[in-house]
Image: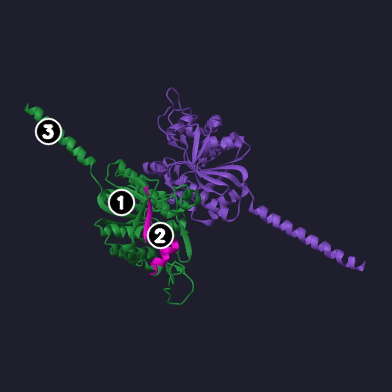
Chain colours: A purple, B green
Amino acid sequence: MNFRIFFKPLTSIFYYLIFLLLFLLNSVSTTGQVKPRKCILVFGAHADDVESLAGGTFAKYISKGYQGVYVCVINNTAGCAIESVGGGTHAPLGKKILFSVSNSPQTYPVDALETIQIRQEEARNAANSFGAIPEFLNFSQPEFFLGRRLVIYGMKEYIEFDPPGRRQVTLATRYDEDVDIVYELLKKYQPEIVITHTLGGEKLDHEGSAYMMYLAFKKAMDNGIPVGKLWMTVNGWLTDIPASENGRGKPDVRINISKHLRLKYTTLNKHFSQNGGFGRDYIMESHTPVNERFEEFITVIDNTR
Amino acid sequence: MNKILILSYLLLFIEGSVLSQAKETPDKCILVFGAHADDVDEIAGGTFAKYIASGYKGVYVSVTNNLAGCNIEKTPYSKGPRFTVSDSPFKYPCDGLETNQIRSVEARAAAAVYGAEIEFLDFCEPEVYFGRKVIIYGTQDFLDYNPPGRRQINLATRYSEDVNVVFELLKKYKPEIVIIHTLGGEKLDHEGSAYMMYLAFTRAIARNIPVGKLWMTVNGWLLDNPAQSNGKGKPDIQINVRDHLKIKYEALNKHLSQNGGAGREYVMNNKTQPKEVIEEFMTVIDNTK
């Protein structure tokens, strides 16, 4: 009897320790196997880039129940115009660009703070149409207009005007504290799919944004954040003859977006200051997609394997 | 009849000159476009030496103005020897103007080892040390310091007048081979320099300047798993540089402020050309076909 009394607490402690060990082992293994969330994050440099990068794919995944995160990387200090649309879109034959009051054939740039405000509102409307969450990262665009004068990042006038925003996005890729902004975004959403511009293929803000995401994505992987796949569009040198011929520029991801074109163009038209509501014409004249029913990408990183 | 003959000759002459213009081939020239003073040696030193040995003119380009990267007491390379006078175990950054001067002198000495011409394009590096304080491009301090140089290299890719600086270089040398850093694969100055050359090279082709092939190193996303397994990261150019390693390292060791004379160790540690005896590249553009 005394024997049993002596061992009963010890047996309980033994079982308790076994349970504790199993619980700990289970949580470690769960942590090791944490999967990304059903979330698609499109990382557009400018306010209207999400649509032109991957508008159809974004709409398609959201319709399947994925959370959509609509990212605008820079602060959009430039790109709006008075009398004509900022993107330089020409109205299709027989149609008229809508916001000319004076009927002037010229385009006059809008100042920085107004441009930020207009383009942010447009981006919020577009994200809303997708049913997505907008995120503005506010890295600086490298220029803005002050009256008719172009002011460039690093100039005395730029520093004096002091537009709101972080460091210029390409420069920012050099500094840990800036990469951490994007890393924190990945930590927050743990997206299964992330889409960026082409690495090394395009103009300044696009390239800077793409490389910034590449750095943050790798950092997320290194720190055990569950992120899935990083896809990029196919542009620049990847569309030149050598890369086209040797397969280097061949996309490995092809998404049929036929059923989502309407939403893609509805959202694109929300960026009225850029395309005057002629979103499809705008996108078809700036790119030459083989087939607008498909969006194509290259897998940069696949962390799901 | 005479008029017809004269017209025929004239037509033939015009056609001939048009054809000869269209057939203009690049010069036997190799141009390596390194972002920093010691990048030529790292990205393609053996290939550069090999082509020069076979009769090509060599053009050694330093794209940025090298405002940063020199230290007092020790090289930036962690395993490098000390230059120490005080025996301090620490590194202290050199100021911008001194660094610019030291690295320019080293680059000139390296180019001379190859027997190459040197070109400094003086696009701004994005930061400079002022005492112990790092000053970043775009700040009031950078503006006040006002180091000599053009616009920061990545920003410069946006402006036609800056792209023209590189376009004019291509027009001057008409190189058969141009080698750059990886497009989209690397840190700020490297990526900016690579993209700047890409823009200038395509502009040169559009304006009928006889340029040949644009090759780049393989780095960044091209070394990651997807690109390695699906072949996108596979180089299509392999140059055996075994017989030219001596010159490559002799040139690299001229950058004493960076590697303390331990050039081989430094470059192997960076894994820029990990196979050492074989330098590898990807063809970005081939204008010879």
Q: Residues within 10 Å of mark 1 (few under 14, many from 20)?
A: many
For label 2, the SS is: loop
| Image location (x, y in percent) of residue B278 | 37, 58
Residue at 60% from the left image edge and 54% from the top image edge: A224
| Residues rendered magenta in the picture | B261-283
Q: Are marks 3 and 1 in contact (CB under 8 Å)?
A: no
Q: Which disc, if any, is residue B177?
A: 1
Q: Report if residue A164 is visible in the image.
A: no
Q: Is residue A236 above or below residue A33?
A: above
- Marks 3 and 1, how far apart at CA: 37 Å
Callout 2, which amino acid?
Lys
Q: Nearer the viewer, residue A75 or A21?
A: A21
Asked if badge 3 and badge 1 are on a common chain, one would say: yes
Q: Nearer the viewer, residue B197 or A158?
A: B197
Chain for disc number 1 = B
Q: Secondary structure at mark 3?
A: helix
- Residues marked 3 and 2 touching at CB (< 8 Å): no
The spot of residue B112 in percent (x, y) is 28, 64
Q: Which residue is mark 3?
A: B9
Q: CA distance from mark 1 to mark 2?
A: 21 Å
| Amino acid type at image mark 1 | Ile
Q: Is residue A14 left or right of residue B234?
A: right
Quarter occupied by residue B113: bottom left
**Residue B242 among those drawn in magenta:** no
Q: Which residue is mark 2?
A: B275
Q: Residues within 10 Å of mark 2 (few under 14, many from 20)?
A: few
